[in-house]
Image (spheres, grey):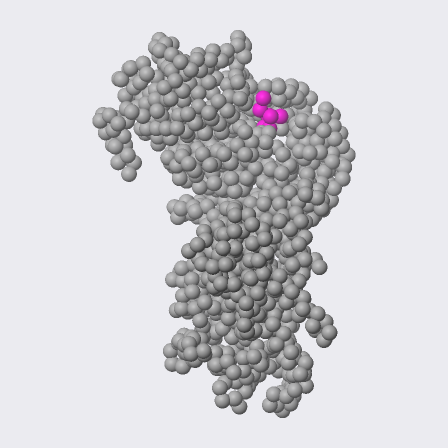
Amino acid sequence: MTKQHWEQIEQLWQQALQIEPRHREAFVKNQTESDESVRAEVLAMLQQEDHSADFLETSALENAARQLAHDKLNAPTIELQGQRFGAYEVISELGAGGMGTVYLARDLHLDRTVAIKVLPDGFKHDPDRLKRFKREAEMLAKVNHPNVATLYDYDRESGYGPRYLVMEYVSGETLDERLKRGKLTAVEAAPIFRQIAEALAAAHAQGIIHRDLKPSNIKIMPNGVVKVLDFGLAKSTAKDLTWTAASTGARNGKATTLTQPQMILGTPGYMSPEQVRGEKALDQRTDWWAFGCMFYEALSGRNPFRSHTIADTNAAILEKEPDWKTLPIETPTAIVRLVHRCLQKDPQRRVRNVSEVLPELKNIQAPARLTIVAYQLRRAAPQLGLLAAGLAILISLFATYQWLKPKPKTMLAIIADQSASPCDLSQSEAIAKAINDKLRSVQGVEIVIPISSDRGQPFLMIDAALTQTALTAEATTILKVAATNCTNSSSPINYSLTRKDGSSLSSGTATDLSQLLLNVVSTLNLPSKVEAWQTSEEDRQYYRAVALLEHYVNEQSVKDALDILHRLEQADQVNLARSKAALGWGYYLQDYLLQVIPPKNSNQTNNREKALSYCDQATNLQRNDPNVLLMCGRVSTALGNLDKAITNFQSLLQQRENDPEAVLELAKAYEFKGEAKNAETQYLRALALRPGYWDVYNQLSGFYFERGEFQKAEEYAQRVTELLDLNPVGFNNLGITLLYQGRYDEAITAYYRSLDKKRLPSTYHSLGTTYLYAGQCNKAVEAFQQGKTLDQEDAEFWGAEGEALSCMGQTVQAANAYEQAIRLMNQQDVSRDASSLSLLAEWYARRNNKKLALQKIEEALQLAPHNYDCIVSAIKVYKLTNEPEKLMIQFEKAVKNRKSLFEVEHDPCVNEITEQETYRKIIEQHKTQRG
Amino acid sequence: MAMNIAPPHDVTQLLVAWSHGDQAALDQLVEIVHDELHRKAHHYMRQERPDHSLQTTALVNEVYLRLVDSKAVTFNDRAHFLAVCANTMRRILVDHARARQQQKRGGEYQKVALDEALMVSNQVGGVDLAALDEALERLAEFAPRKAQVVEMRYFGGLTVKETAAALSVSEDTVMDDWKFAKAWLLKELRNQ
């Protein structure tokens, strides 16, 4: 190993730890840019993770002392063989524990095999030990139950207490051993846990709590009978037993209670919060907690709280919610509900009685439709902190729509391979899109991604980001495709189909799309209807055009797409409607691009009219074609025909029930229409459909942000950063949600995390604005200047720098910056872009050019009277040009929106007005109205 | 047992001298600390009560209080002293473990498999200190600080705060090193 290797190992290990535990292995396997040896090393370390909690957590000295003691305990083993204890003859050792060594023995009277637990020699005169041993015997004697190992006999000869116990010998493997072979399905686990529950019920009925339930204390016999072992730590809640409450023994002249306060009782990872806190008054609910832990572990393969160190594990028990997503998706609701109730940190809310447990374990079968629905709803709750109201919406929604169907076996993510493609990805994206559409209606498979149309951010088009997205979105299988030729759309296709753990299902080269589909379908064991997989050259052309429109929104790509679609319009009469609909979307995009960055003197053709006309034609041809509904629905949303858009997406959802993409489009249309409740409902619906897909959280965060619900926006933005930590925009967004809550320091931290991922101009803009609002004008200047180094021609940075310089009182430099901003902005035609116009107005106002300032801001307000960015700009312009009446009109608009109000209150250019009596009153009024 | 222990004053002076760069002072210091710790560690180990938690920290602190005039040294000097103790403790315990193994090999001793040992590490068995020592040497080749963290925490019983002070790094760094080292060492021990 070299030093360099070592650094890579450390780095990869740190990265892996940032990811949810269940995805770590796959993540590491996918880091193909690291050396194989590096990955192998990190994987080997990760495999130890579950076991590392206790490792090295007791000191070396203690370890050495224990080994010494162990040597002593071990020594008599050999001597004991063949030795008799009363009527019992020792055959062999079964196992050793702190409470004693257990031997297999023969009962010479009854001629049966028994287990004898013998107190180690070293403890035979220890009153504490003798008492505890006696207590175990008495407890076992009281609990006579088929699921508890029966006590047959004990040593009655000793005056102090029994030196050995004779118990039923239970063959079979422990639950711990069983779980080492793999986790259990709900159907397998239910009978085991039913028996554990019954054993606990019997003990609890006697006032006995076990206190040390863990998988190694549960034995599963070959005939399926389950026995709970080791009541060595058990405690009676009854007060009449002399050896329970604070019984003392004299040793070294000091009084010692039976369980000393410093002693760790119980086992890390299974202790209840009250046990961790060292509370003395424990009751049966402690056992139900451990029961829940074991159940969770049995189903998921992981202890819900175990962490690297005992301290971390204990902290997790006290504070952290288990990761409910680790439970398999098909787990029946009843069981999830039960585990949930067992793992309530507040004992008051936890299961108390077996009567609450057994009904949940009856009739556990393969999951049915309704149970899955309820589970998904609940599952979203803990991680998101969804409010009860949100949950209620979700549940009532279910009554109206039936939008969640059972999860199919295969959750497929289709990814255009970013590394294997020789040129731009549109050919590969086209293949991904085609497969997505073809497999969409097939039973047994669900497409996880792509679902969103606007992911065309280059920094996310990298393999690591897409793979992470696929895994967090709960893909079980990943299909990567790569075209082998950039220009020829009928060239062969490389593909690989892997499981989520990175292991390969199949890979190779397919001669064409049809063959690829056939390979995928047969590998995944999907119903094979050969004719459905036939694809034509036209199909591939069409999907290429769609890929160009959806992933590469720039002038050239739109132009190329329109060319392809016009050719298809002539050549492909069969699919004329979809081509026309895509043309509609393409012309809308062209209109949009010209509006944002129009070249000077371009003859603005009637792109909008063309967009509308193509959509009309498409609708007339095939009103209910899903492609037509989707594309033309988008055009309608974009052009403000929101009712039409909503109708389109609703019809689409009738055909493609639960298609997250359609749900998100519907949500957006409602949002733009101002129907916030409906929009929220649909966003949450998308979230329930794709609980691990970052973009849904991203959209929802944006929705709340625009509504001024910054705290909610922050929660969802936070989730975005967790789900896809490679995404710089996620951290930038998080920062902005913090900024609007006045949490400047946290916001700045988030921006720097974003800049660590990628230096994006927009992040410097956010950073500078935050410093400006926080009153750190010099730092704001610095941030804007750094942003400017990324794009010298960006007018906005010049303008922003001017503001920061004004704030510092450096009027000369500020004036230069404003002039530069004005010059750059005027190189473009911004006559139709309200936000550019309003910025321009601000800069004119700063340069005391009152006439142009007023002219530009009025143009902007005419174009977009309800755009809050323009309204805030107008307030600044009217303040600078001293137009108090006009200012008041805009001010009254601004206070209605929390975002713009925040800006007015914090922007150094205008914030002083909010201290004036008149304005203050208006603000107060609105705040009280809002409640 | 009569031990030839230097009076507190001397150890304090040695410690101060060492903190000013006097390497010879360190050698003397180690010698004194070794004798004292050796005696105490063996005393503790022979109590043979595996269910009673032994506090290395307590032990080291006891040695510290016995040997050092705490008013005359700074917190950082104290941390350095504890680091010396940790290293000494490591040598004592590893030597002890090696001796124990040799003794066992003569008899019919079966080495407890590590899995099993870990399973019951709260009760008996535990970590093979000799193997751990070798693994730590390998770790130190590439990540000397991580190895030191383990030495101080595991062998010396230093708290995270004390370890951080002794190494002049943040507590977060100590925790990161600790987690990494644990996983790496466990992997090494298992792959033996």
Residue A40 percent location from the top left of the image: 69, 48
Q: Is residue A450 left or right of residue A649?
A: right
Question: Which residue is at a point 52% across and 42% down the rendered structure image?
Answer: A722
Find residue A868 and report its image quarter.
Answer: top left
Question: Which residue is at a point 66% across and 70% down the rendered structure image?
Answer: B100
Question: Which residue is at a point 69% across and 36% down the rendered structure image?
Answer: A481
Question: Which residue is at a point 27% across and 30% down the rendered structure image?
Answer: A923
Q: Can residue A477 be seen in this view?
A: no
Residue A73 percent location from the top left of the image: 61, 77
Q: Nearer the viewer, residue A650 or B99?
A: B99
Q: Which of A466 and B74 is in front in this view?
A: B74
In the picture, the quarter occupied by the C terminus of chain A is: top left
Up-down relation of residue A626 to residue A341 (above or below): above
Q: Is residue A280 left or right of residue A921?
A: right
Q: Nearer the viewer, residue A143 or B168?
A: B168
Residue A203 percent location from the top left of the image: 47, 75
- Membership of A551 in magenta stretch: yes
Q: Can residue B182 be seen in this view?
A: yes
Give, as a single range, the part of the protein colored magenta. Answer: A548-554
